[in-house]
Amino acid sequence: EYAALKDVYNENKKLKKSLDNYTRELAYNKQLEKELDDLKSITNIKNLPTEYTLSYTTVIKRDSEAWDSTVMINSGSQSGIKKGMAVMSANGMVGVITRVGAVSSEVRLLCTENTGFQLPVMIQSGKDTLYGLLNGYDTGTHCFKIQLLSTASKVETNAEVLTSGLGGSDKTP
């Protein structure tokens, strides 16, 4: 019984330390938020590309003939969904809203050969930052097609590709 009590005591010490760290991080985050708000006010920036609201939804329809191109989700204009919004999964961006109904929306998946849109992207290749437009997917190689807008002699294999934040207001990030 004494050993169990000692284990609880030690666990409690760890939890208190963790809580102290959490409180410190929370205070630091509040300070950063205030600084960010001040900078946005000075520069007249209303929204940053990283500021977005999440809306959780479910795929309700996936056509077997268009399996790799579109899905239907159970959120629409009544949930604040708009055409051109990005659709995310736990692993990153998977598509863009292309049609909006009152209670459902159509999502054009990024893994379709011809997306029908161009998505501004930023590529981190070594120390270089490159910009381009994602405009399709090669089903043979399972790679995205990107038209580079930056001059680059070489893009590293497995370079990180991110949405650039240059899509504009109410557009994909």
Image: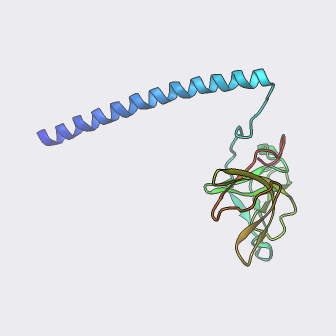
Describe residue 24's horizontal placement relative to residue 100 as left or right.
left
Q: Residue at x 64, y 22 (%)?
A: 34
Q: How is the image coloured?
A: rainbow
Q: Quadrant of the N terminus?
A: top left
Name the image quarter holding residue 31.
top right
Number of numbered labels in the structure image = 0
Q: Which residue is most to the bottom?
A: 140
Residue 103, relative to residue 113: is it above or below? above
| x and y percentages locating residue 150 in the rendered image | 80, 54
Residue placed most toward the observer, 10 or 150: 150
Name the image quarter holding residue 12.
top left
Residue 40, relative to residue 8: is it above or below? above
Q: Residue at x 84, y 42 (%)?
A: 168
Task: Confirm whether residue 104 shows in the render.
Answer: no
Residue 85, relative to residue 49: is it above or below? below
Name the image quarter holding residue 110.
bottom right
Residue placed most toward the observer, 24 or 159: 159
| x and y percentages locating residue 39 in the rendered image | 71, 24
Q: Which residue is most to the front?
A: 153
Residue placed most toward the observer, 115 or 159: 159
| x and y percentages locating residue 32 in the rendered image | 60, 26
Q: Which residue is most to the left?
A: 2
| x and y percentages locating residue 165 in the rendered image | 76, 44
Describe residue 17's horizontal placement relative to residue 125 as left or right.
left
Task: Confirm whether residue 33 shows in the render.
Answer: yes
